Amino acid sequence: MTVLGIETSCDETAAAVVRRHANGRGEILSNVVLSQVDDHAIYGGVVPEIAARAHIANLDGVIRRAMEEAELGYHELDVVAATAGPGLIGGVIVGLMTAKAIAFAADKPLVAVNHLEAHALTVRLTDTVAFPYLLLLVSGGHTQFVQVNGVGSYERLGTTIDDALGEAFDKTAKLLGLPYPGGPEVEKAAHRGDPKRFAFPRPLAGRPGLDMSFAGLKTAVRTQAEKIQPVSEQDIADICASFQQAAADVVGDRAHRALTRFTQEFPQTPPVLVVAGGVAANARIRAVLTQAAEQAGATMIAPPPALCTDNAAMIAWAGAERFAFGYSDPMDTGPRPRWPLDETALPILGEGRKGAKV
Ligand code: KG4
Ligand code: ZN
């Protein structure tokens, strides 16, 4: 099955062609990502109106390139998939309408993909991972532990009660004067810093449950930075390293707890912890998760960093998995700016609101 995927929910205009073989194995034929970072950088965050206009300007060319690199014509596709939410409504409309137009013109089925489900299933594109598995989804708008029972079947076990982890990275970068997007910049600066210089709080660590909190950590970073004004290069590096370590400790603590719960629930299943979303590109976060998994007798698997940050290969793959499962969507499917992965989970502040990054 060959699927064209389209992603426009935030600040990447992306198109990809992915193949799902009969044995469930995945193959990426093309994966084109056009970042709008330069368009938004001077504002220090994503401006929804600018994002939507840039998607309109660039999407056709990005799709054309993805098809050319895959060396395929539209008639050779089996499915057209696009992100239908959650995300910035203007961008989602652009991608979904374009997908509908291609599906209609080429007479192919449409699959409307939940962006979070795409992050959740990406690992099955690159690795052989069976259901159920435990997922830590850490992006700019979401931070949650999810039990992935199967395609379309997700149970949220815990979530941030305030800021998403990526948001905390971005805000820390912003207040230290580092360029946008902040996550990779904080990681880079942290390499030169001392993670022990500042004792930042580890909110909720050790407490029962699987919820997380990062707002207090961000405030502690601000207070500390204000205390030592003007900050030197070394101060910035030390703050970044100390912040990253505190964030990683919180995530590691929760992951260990989540794995214990998962193992109790599925004693017969070899436990696998999958990490996905933009923050999964962070080497320190990966390291604490690997350690937590080892301690719990589990395996940690992370997709390659380029498939952790937003891309369309993951959308195409989710489209393939859904279509193989028997799902497709009608032409009047609408965009969903809010679309929780687990529709039964109670909404919590800071949860399910991808896009509000500025
Ligand atoms: O999944 P993603 O590309 O977009 C959303 O769906 O939100 O995640 C973007 C987030 C941003 O907050 C970005 O700063 C963060 O992931 N991020 C990182 C790293 N690379 C991206 N955070 C920490 N370390 C990184 N290396
Ligand atoms: Zn994402």
Image (tube, rainbow, N blue to C red):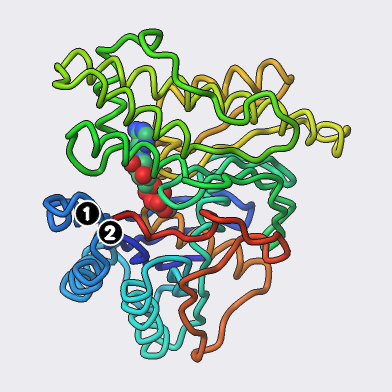
* Mark 2 surroundings: few (<14), some (14-19) or many (≥20) residues within 10 A: many
Q: Is residue 20 at least partly visible in the picture?
A: no
| Nearer-the-camera pick, 229 or 324 | 229
Give how far across and how far down residue 110 sits, in percent.
Answer: 50, 80
Q: Amino acid at mark 1?
A: Ser
Sequence-earlier tag: 1 or 2:
2
**Where on the picture, by quarter, is residue 4?**
bottom left
Give how far across and how far down residue 16 sits, in percent.
Answer: 35, 60
Q: Amino acid at mark 2?
A: Asp
Q: Is residue 210 at least partly visible in the picture?
A: yes
Above or below — where is 19 with respect to 170? below
- The residue to which callout 1 is attached is 35
* Mark 1 surroundings: few (<14), some (14-19) or many (≥20) residues within 10 A: some
What residue appears at the point 31 percent right and 26 percent down from the top-left corner?
Answer: 187
Give how far across and how far down residue 210 sits, in percent.
Answer: 69, 38
Q: Residue furthest front?
A: 227
Q: Find out if the beta carbon at label 1 lies less than 8 Å from the nearest ligand 1 atom.
A: no
**Where on the picture, by quarter, is residue 228?**
top left
Secondary structure at numbered mark 2:
loop
| Nearer-the-camera pick, 160 or 260 | 160
What residue appears at the point 27 percent right and 62 percent down from the top-left corner?
Answer: 13
Q: CA distance from mark 1 to mark 2?
A: 6 Å
Above or below — where is 209 with respect to 108? above
What residue appears at the point 64 percent right and 30 percent down from the top-left corner?
Answer: 255
Specify the quadrant that holds the C terminus.
bottom left
- The residue to which callout 2 is attached is 11
